[in-house]
Amino acid sequence: MPTREDLQILQAQDLELKVMLTKQRIREWVTAFSTQGVYVSFSGGKDSTVLLHLVRSVYPDVEAVFVNTGLEYPEIQRFVKTFENVRILYPKKTFKQVISEYGYPLLGKEIAYTIEHAKMGQKRCTAKIQGQVEYNGEKSRFNLDKYLPLMNANFQISSKCCDTMKKKPAKTYEKKADKKAIIATLAEESLVRQNRWILYGCNAFESERPTSKPMSFWTEQDVLKYIKEENLPIASVYGDIVPVGGQMSFEGCDCKLCTTGCDRTGCIFCGFGAHLEKGEGRFQRLKRTHPKQYDFCINGGGYDENGIWKPNEKGLGMGHVFDELNKLYGENFIKYK
């Protein structure tokens, strides 16, 4: 079984070797399932744009699949339509319906899941949110008692949004078409993704839902460098790729790169990780760049008959939710104004 050290060694390799290894993983996946038995999960983001380029450099006819949740930046939706052989899927519920039924996606998936299931009485989640999990007789660092006050908040928190709006349409399509996904996730993005790589490697043939993640050992810098070297088009919402802090030009240097626009895309109303952002927050940026979407996100909302805050016809009401979080955890816990 691969180790964390193996992952770190791969992450430290140069881009040329990573490209070679990634194409090798792609070939292994396609050899197992055929070009008609796989698809590229294409979000329109920079990572999946690189993945699609890598896959089609070896297998030009592989299908791409885009799940249009209605939550992507308009620039992303337009960018996706510039590619050929892209199948577009849609969820059965809107974001407004999902958060009205289950709750808002806030803080992080594990935190939201723990709060949600502790309210349902699940013993493990209840112990975590109450700070009662121990390891070798000591309180575990994985306790989430910092968020215990949210058990009694006047709004619901849930981790179900991504599963309902993105994963469910993709899984339904996979089963119907008998295809296996190739996905552009990077292990550096979370501990969960690192652990999945340690368990399965890049090609998870043995998992319950077999998927290929052939770029797992890449870093964000690798992605940006590949885009520059291959002169790939990316969605305009990212802006340009430039050296950080006015360093020398990209040509002939190993300088760190960044985007002048969004650094990450994804669902524009998602609150996961918003409390960790430095500098301009995603919702502050949304206010500046997409005021119409910002107004719908922040404004509106109201209490239902049980006193729970939910979206209404005027908007999602996330401004109220952020205000409540800022009262509990500090004025700029989530920056949105």
Image: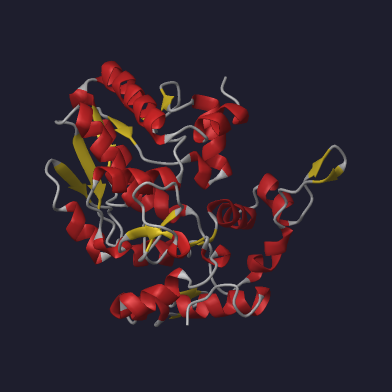
Q: Which residue is nearer to you in this view: 309 or 276?
A: 276
Which residue is found at the position 32% from the left and 38% from the top? Answer: 171
Counting from the top left corner in percent of width and height, residue 45 is at: 31, 52
**Residue 36 image-quadrant placement:** top left
Which residue is found at the position 33% from the left and 43% from the top? Answer: 226
Which residue is found at the position 69% from the left and 46% from the top? Answer: 123
Residue 220 is left or right of residue 77, and the answer is: right
Asked if residue 148 can be seen in this view, the reply is yes
Counting from the top left corner in percent of width and height, residue 132 is at: 79, 50
Residue 139 is left or right of residue 276, and the answer is: right
Which residue is found at the position 60% from the left and 26% from the top? Answer: 3
Counting from the top left corner in percent of width and height, residue 323 is at: 56, 80
Q: Which residue is nearer to you in this view: 254 or 274?
A: 254
Residue 236 is left or right of residue 117, and the answer is: left
Residue 18 vs 112, above or below: the answer is above
Residue 238 vs 228, above or below: the answer is below
Quarter of the picture containing the N terminus is top right
**Residue 313 image-quadrant placement:** bottom left
Counting from the top left corner in percent of width and height, residue 60 is at: 15, 31
